[in-house]
């Protein structure tokens, strides 16, 4: 047990077991034991999970990305505009949206890596800018299938097929496509961080940027890469969000960055950088997801849910810190 507590993954697993045990005890007349409860939990946490994958990439490099929620909102608006109102096909809409996310992330990474702006400040600026751009593009309105016709009246156009595909469930309704997208995002982030040279260099930068620099690691290039990938993942999350809501909401993703950071930290990845990884983030995603679902099925009010979630997050972080 002592060895388990001195391992970040072990502490995260123990936290997850405790949360699941709470669900077993407070199962809402057996609701917790039904597969659809777990399926719905995975679907609800999928967008946050994609953002958590993005956050993990920048956190292991010693950074932070406060703009992930705003980039999600911007991407949701752009994807809906391209596919619904402009009539673009699925592939051009997806590619254009992903490029927008990557470019925005690259701008943040360039400010941090090239001009030495603090990650908190650079991504805070991008958070405000991206949210404002989303509202400017959409004129502050949700981009939906209701468009103004030539006579000034609203006309409803068909929902693009890509929305139905992303929003559907597969395998006899046992798993949502957005959950599969989260799994793909987490797998891609894991491969990048653990199996590629740039990924290992990000760990070196997060551990000791001066030592990494003397070892020949290009900090500006790798920083831009990390934040570009973060923006790319945010765009994927925005596409998933728009498909589930059947619209692009310029307010989508507000405060999502807090949930993404919580998932990363609760899993055991240090905000100081240099340690952790996607395997820990997955545990953090499940901890937050099950916590929210258990409180929901037991009809705990949103106000109480938020307070309890905050308390449990602090307790989990202190637990991780104590075991370090």
Image (tube, rainbow, N blue to C red):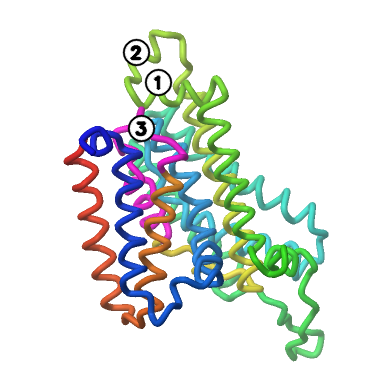
Q: Earlier in the sequence, mark 3 or mark 2?
A: 3
Label 2 environment density (alpha carbons within 10 Å; few <14, some 14–19, many ≥20): few
Residue occupying image coordinates x 56% and y 59%: 74
Q: Which mark is residue 62?
A: 3
Residue stretch in magenta:
256-280
Give the vertical position of 299 relative to 320 (above or below): below
Distance between the Cα atoms at labels 3 and 2?
14 Å
Distance between the Cα atoms at labels 1 and 3?
9 Å
Residue at the far left: name it: 322
Label 3 environment density (alpha carbons within 10 Å; few <14, some 14–19, many ≥20): many
Distance between the Cα atoms at labels 2 and 1?
8 Å
> Residue 69: image x %, image y %?
46, 57
Residue occupying image coordinates x 55% and y 20%: 197
Residue occupying image coordinates x 72% and y 53%: 94
Residue occupying image coordinates x 46% and y 49%: 52
The answer to whether the residues at label 1 and label 3 have Cβ atoms under 8 Å apart is no
Which quarter of the figure is the C terminus placed in? top left
The answer to whether the residues at label 3 and label 2 have Cβ atoms under 8 Å apart is no
246 left or right of 58 in image: right
> Residue 97: image x %, image y %?
67, 52
Secondary structure of the residue carrying numbered label 2 = helix
Q: Which mark is residue 204?
A: 1
Give the vertical position of 190 relative to 144 (above or below): above
Secondary structure of the residue carrying numbered label 1 = helix
The answer to whether the residues at label 2 and label 1 have Cβ atoms under 8 Å apart is yes
In the picture of the structure, the residue carrying the numbered disc 2 is 211
> Residue 254: image x %, image y %?
43, 64
């Amino acid at each position: 047990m002592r060895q388990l507590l001195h391992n970040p993954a072990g502490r995260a697993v123990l936290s997850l077991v405790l949360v699941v045990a709470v669900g077993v005890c407070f199962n809402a007349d057996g609701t917790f034991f039904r597969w659809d409860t777990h399926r719905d939990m995975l679907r609800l946490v999928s967008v946050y999970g994609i953002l958590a994958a993005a956050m993990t990439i920048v956190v292991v490099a010693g950074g932070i990305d406060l703009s992930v929620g705003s980039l999600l909102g911007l991407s949701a608006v752009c994807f809906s505009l391209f596919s619904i109102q402009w009539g673009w096909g699925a592939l051009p809409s997806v590619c254009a949206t992903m490029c927008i996310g990557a470019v925005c992330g690259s701008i943040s990474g360039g400010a941090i890596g090239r001009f030495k702006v603090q990650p908190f400040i650079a991504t805070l600026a991008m958070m405000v800018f991206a949210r404002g751009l989303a509202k400017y593009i959409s004129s502050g309105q949700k981009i939906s299938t209701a468009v103004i016709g030539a006579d000034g009246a609203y006309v409803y156009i068909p929902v693009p097929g890509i929305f139905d595909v992303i929003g559907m469930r597969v395998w006899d309704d046992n798993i949502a496509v957005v959950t599969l997208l989260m799994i793909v995002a987490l797998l891609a982030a894991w491969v990048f961080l653990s199996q590629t040279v740039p990924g290992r260099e990000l760990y070196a930068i997060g551990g000791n940027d001066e030592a990494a620099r003397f070892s020949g690691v290009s900090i500006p290039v790798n920083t831009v890469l990390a934040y570009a990938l973060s923006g790319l993942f945010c765009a994927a999350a925005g596409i998933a969000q728009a498909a589930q809501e059947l619209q692009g909401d310029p307010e989508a993703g507000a405060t999502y960055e807090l949930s993404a950071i919580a998932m990363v930290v609760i899993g055991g990845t240090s905000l100081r950088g240099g340690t952790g990884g996607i395997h820990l983030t997955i545990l953090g995603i499940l901890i937050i997801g099950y916590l929210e679902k258990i409180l929901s099925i037991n009809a705990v009010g949103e106000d109480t849910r938020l307070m309890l979630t905050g308390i449990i997050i602090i307790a989990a972080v202190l637990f991780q810190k104590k075991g370090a």
